[in-house]
Image (cartoon, coloured by chain):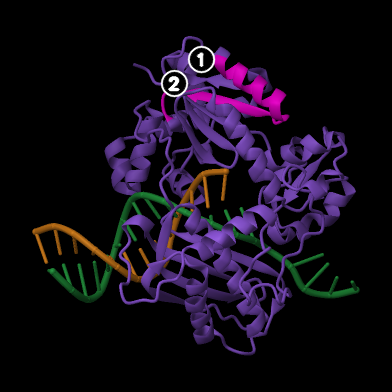
Chain colours: A purple, B orange, C green
Amino acid sequence: MQQSIALVDCNNFYVSCERVFRPDLENKPVVVLSNNDGCVVARSGEVKALGINMGEPWFKIRDAARRHGIIAFSSNYALYADMSNRVMNVLSAFSPHQEVYSIDESFLDLTGFADVRGHAREIRKTVRRHLGIPVCVGIGPTKTLSKLANHVAKKHPRSEGVFDYNVLTGSQRQSVLKNIGVNDVWGIGKKLSASLHAQGIETVLQLRDANAKGMRAKHGVVMERIIAELNGISCIGVTDIDPPKKQIVSSRSFGQTVEDIDDLKDAIAHFVTNAALKLRAQGSVAGIVQVFIMTDRFRNDQPQYNPSMSLPIPVPTDDSLLISQWAGRGLDAIFRKGYFYKKAGVILSEISDKSLAQTDMFAPIRKPELMHAMDSVNARFGKGALRLSQDGSRRSWSMRQENRSPEYTTRWDEVAVCRC
DNA sequence: ATCTGGCTAGGAC
DNA sequence: CTAACGGTCCTAGCCAGAT
């Protein structure tokens, strides 16, 4: 039977989240910036129309943005994550199989549904009514084609936010695919698209009809799968359960450069806390912690130094204190005086299930309640209520955020500012 | 001859 | 006034070394 996979994608998600609480910004040009107010990571339609690109460094376009009256928000991930959970929750009622693919996208398996397009229109209406977030729905026989269908739904106002590839005739499919560039296909980025162009393949139609064997030899299995998916042969299934992470990273660019090891100690302790929290949340332990510090790669006039060190943790653990000790040791080993550090982070790897993990029978037993208590206190009273002693005595490294909106949905003390 | 770990490239969002 | 460019996560493919 023909599969009907739907991809539901929120429009300009971060901008839409801000607009829910600031309806006065409807029809106005709005952007949301990355951490440190670095780059543009979400644009309203008005901003896209001005030709401002995704990922554009903010300082480069600040003047032009001011001239056009663009409103810029610092990123407010607490808000976006909470809104995302609500959206995903609403969507879960529309299919027995949902794969939450990213903060603003879900795949839903609608195979066998009587009126797929009607169902999709209902999805849009419901999310809009419950949460005020506009979404588009693309439907196809494979994930790759549902992504492409979503692209069409977003681009063509006549589709009214829903596009179903499955109901098209063969020649209609051809003309749709002929009008989309290969760079818009899921899994094809800048490099692959350049190498396809060099081969004379410009459109999705050309790619779909390319010789599968030759393409596999030249570009690898990823390309082979993409081509199969474009031909309606599903290679990438919808998976409802998300597997535990194999790697957990916590890192940040600093608001200002730092020279002092004590500032880096503070930052690293903070990153360990954050990463270990995620580790415990998925019920895992880590066997390796890697620490890295970096100078500003954009400053050609300054000496660069980007060391890192991997430290095996003798007995894999989820204990912030233990991990922090190893990370601190790593930092001591790689730190050199005299550099201006701009970024640092920790990476946890060799991650395994805590319940299956080998324990160290000679080690002093640390009460598991300690970490548990720390997580509960922080969940209840806010992140950072209870911290490691190294974390937070110095905050010289904290990021710039000039225009962050209130945490409307997750903090009572910020709700009062809501203007709705 | 095959498996393994380490590392880089490329990609998504 | 100047300087100012994100964060997390994945898989494939290659190589070297071990089995």
Q: Is residue A180 left or right of residue A132?
A: left
Query: Magenta segment: does it hold A160?
Result: no
Q: Is residue A80 left or right of residue A327?
A: right
Question: Where residue A413 appears, x then y in whole percent?
Answer: 81, 50
Q: Which mark is residue A4?
A: 2
> Dot 1 lies on which element?
helix
Question: Where residue A309 appears, x then y in whole percent?
Answer: 46, 77
Question: Where residue A280 appears, x then y in whole percent?
Answer: 48, 57
CA neighbours of label 2 inside 10 A, class few (<14), some (14 to 19), many (20+)? many
Question: Where residue A88 appears, x then y in whole percent?
Answer: 58, 33
Residue closer to the observer: A288 or A184: A288
Query: Magenta segment: does it hold A138?
Result: yes
Asked if marks 1 and 2 touch (Cβ < 8 Å), the reply is yes
Quadrant holding the N terminus of chain A: top left
Q: Which mark is residue A11?
A: none
> Dot 2 lies on which element?
loop
Q: Quadrant of residue A263?
A: bottom right
Look at the image and tell me whether residue A179 can be seen.
no
Q: Which mark is residue A116?
A: 1
Q: Residue at x 38, y 74 (%)?
A: A312
**Magenta residue span:** A119-142
